[in-house]
Amino acid sequence: MGGPAGRPSDQGLSRRSFLKGAGGAAAASGVLAADAASQEAATAEGAATLSGTTEVELTVNGQARKVSVEPRTTLLSALRDRMDPALTGAKLVCDMGSCGACTVIIDGQPVYGCMTLAARCQGKAITTVEGFGSPDKMSDVQDAFCEKDGLMCGFCTPGFVVATHAALDRKPNADIDELKYELSGNLCRCGTYPHIFEAAKAVQMSRAAGTGEAQEGAGR
Amino acid sequence: MSPDPSWGKRADLDVLNRDIRRVDGPEKVTGRAIYTHDVRLPNMLYARTLRLQTARAKINAVDVEAARQLPGVVHIHIEKEPGSEVRYSGDDSIIAVVAAETMEAALDGVRAIVVDLEKLPPVVTEKAAKAANAPLVNYSRNADSNVTTASESGDRAAIDEVIRGAAALVELDIEIPTQHHVCLETHGHVVDPAEREGFVHIYASTQNVSGMPGQFRRPLERDSDTIRVITPHMGGGFGAKFGAGLEGALAARIARETGRPVHYMLSRADEFTMAGNRSGSKQKIRLAANAEGKLIAVDLDAEKHGGQGRGALPGAPYRYEVENVSSRVVSVKTAADSNRAMRAPGHPQASFGMESAVDMIAYALKMDPVEVRRLNLSSEVHSRQLDTVAKEIGWADHPNRTAPGKAGDNGMAVGIGFGAAGWGPGGRASQCDVTVNPDGTVVSATATQDLGTGARTYVAAIVAEELGLQVSDVLAKIGDSELPPSVASGGSVTTGSSAPAIKDAAHQAREALEAKLEPVLGAAVGGYLWKDGQVSVRDGDGGQSLSWKAVCALLREPLVVRGKFKQALYRGDIHGIQAAKVEVDTLTGRVRVLKMVAVQDQGLPLNRMALRSQINGGMIQALSYGLLEQRVFDEQDGYLLSDNLDLYKIAGPQEMPEMVALIDDEDERESVCGMAEATIIPGHGAIANAIYNACGVRLTKMPFTADNVLEALYGKV
Ligand code: FES
Ligand code: FES
């Protein structure tokens, strides 16, 4: 897959592999995962060993944010549940990398926040949907979503906004088929896809017309 | 005297019947909109569920001692006491709920609970439920069988007689699996037990704000008029979110017992297991027509598969006019979650059966399926809509119009199919307050919820239209049980109920302001024109006008009026036609939808852009239902195998065809109503008909996955 392929990969330690030992033990015996098992998994992946609750510093939307996490805490959970004030724009929907509602940008790449460990994000630049704009100063993509009605209940919308930004960065001139491919890591139940495609096309056109300036200037 | 409120002619409107940007768009696209799922309160506990993974068991012991010792675990509620039974896969599967300081700690608690149980045969399939000596899983009082007594109508013997003389007779066996709502925001609540201003506050992901407080009376042990339910935004309902559910009652109870706010949203697997579904069905249909293509008799023999529910199916004939009808319908109960209302409950199922049969009649008579539909749908509206859709999908230039086509040398075949929709959206007792303040600010307030339909936007837009303002001049307040009551959003009733009440309130506000204007501008109430932020005397020379601000400055205190539902502003009787164009790969069985077209009427379009979104949404959900969706249980042990979004597929960007959503502008009724249900009804039937039209194979089993298509083509996969 295009866009989505970049998400869970190159994180070294995935949440899946991390929990393999732990989850198996819990399921079999009904007891809490032993710390040793998790640490073993972590070491095997060549990561630094963490245990218990640790304070880490994450750079989110250009700000340094301190947050206490456990080794297993996902980036999504760190943003939503552990930061104060919380960043709840990214949503938890499937919790397994199927829907894209949790999409955030890490070092320029779209990533599923539910599949990424928070502790692995230290020193990286994280951008959430909140970082792209605010209601008074929306990004061009956000504004186009409003203009073309690329949202209904809005629960998938933050993920789609971030994924659309990423898709247009990666493929500024994507045609409709390429766009579908780039956005195929995200799901919407209300059925906003056709209007999301229209929004993306509108952004392409305004960027082409305003060459560069449009990206910043279209917000209002 | 001034006239009663009326919507007026389309041409005279400045705000409505246009593309209106959603008023909550900016909050939603920037991640600032707070859903129940996002509510964060100081000292809040997170709750997670321990569910039995299989369908049925006898519970011998639930040992929570280890779980209690875990750091962060605060409270454990045991739902299944020793000696009790889990009787079906659904809310009855909840064994315990753990509330903890963090979500992870709550999950630790869940994992640490040790349950001693004895497995019982699952009975999750209809086959198992109907088997001789099947355990009784129909828990209705006095039930002695898993199959309910048949509800029968018509005289089958007489029908057989009519059928014997028919020019065409078709018979088919329809099989439809269970579908899930898949609201992206799972069901759940945040209950804050601390009393503030006389209320306990509950944030709820619900489509029934006004109806919620009463549902919490018991678990909170307090009067419902001291319970306030708030739903600023909600992430999809589709019929699944009318009640607080067991999860709501438990959230409230844990909040009351711990004295701390409780955040209890279902996990995705919980949601698939216990948050409802669209019932499956089996339908044996016999449909007969005379030589002109007029339908003369139909017989339906059906089973509804609603788990613990009765299932939904409107019966025969569906949508089309047929003189002689007989039917026999039973429900087969299984140990699975109850069906719930889901966007046009029962109708997409019935539509699939009937649209397939009508199509078969057309081809059996070598007639054009569009013409056979026209002949048997009684309404002029459907007839003109058939023309519109046929034109848009390219029917006139399509080679196979009275007989199916064949695959080319590369195995590919292209076909077009049709389907009809209708609905009777309700309208009843909603209310709305409009407040005009001396400083010119305007608030329009009603308890209603916005499921993604754009309700919040028309709560403001209708007032703006009446007072000659812009949408942004009016603040819409919704999603709060303390606001004027509103109906639950089911059956497309919200617009038909709320919009008339909003209009009535706006009209009253306008008249009250005109009464104040009489001594200033001279005209009596009803003699003013409100436009572009100005009010002027309707038949004046243009000199007598005031700005909106100046009008409001005449007020000494805020003007507050209460609007009520007005029958004259509402009319619920709507029509739609849809078509699909597909490409079938007869070598691999893969079906790709190339294009879908829908036309829909609904009276006055309040917000054209939001309407097109809804029409698209209906088509897409039908496409998804037709091509992908299917609940799958493990028959042997009763595990729900499709309890996640990898194994339960919904349509994504890659499945999207070209979509054309048309608003029927030949409908000039000066009335409003909702329309969401109608748009989801015929799409998957149109796709099946398109598959037949492409290559002559009739898909009677949903979803139209490659294996089902291959089986239909070659009798085996
Ligand atoms: S919640 Fe992360 S991909 Fe669905
Ligand atoms: S807008 Fe509701 S899920 Fe996409």
Image: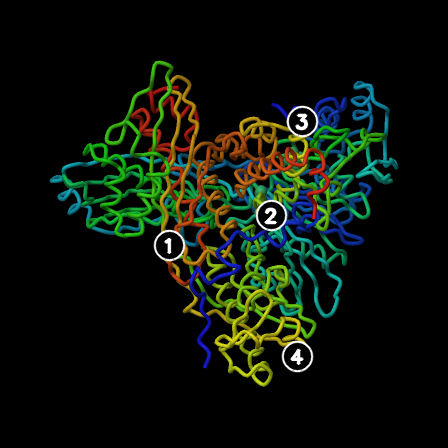
Give me the C-alpha separation between circle 2 and circle 3: 29 Å
Give me the C-alpha separation between circle 1 and circle 2: 27 Å
- Determine the image quadrant of residue B399: top left
Observer-nearest of A47 and B495: B495
Q: Which mark is residue B235?
A: 2
Quadrant for the N terminus of chain B in the image: bottom left
Q: Which mark is residue B574?
A: 1
Give me the C-alpha separation between circle 4 and circle 2: 40 Å
Q: Amino acid at mark 4?
A: Leu
Label 4: which secondary element: loop
Q: Which mark is residue A170?
A: 3
Residue assigned mark 4: B555
Q: Earlier in the sequence, mark 4 or mark 2?
A: 2
- Determine the image quadrant of residue B355: top left
Callout 3 environment at 10 Å: few (<14), some (14 to 19), or many (20+)? some
- Answer above or below: position of B638 versus A88: above
Q: Give percent across and percent down for residue B298.
A: 23, 44
Residue B384 located left or right of residue A39: left
Q: Nearer the viewer, mark 2 or mark 3?
A: 3
Give me the C-alpha separation between circle 4 and circle 1: 42 Å
Callout 4 environment at 10 Å: few (<14), some (14 to 19), or many (20+)? some
Q: Earlier in the sequence, mark 4 or mark 1?
A: 4
What is the total number of numbered labels drawn onto the structure image? Answer: 4
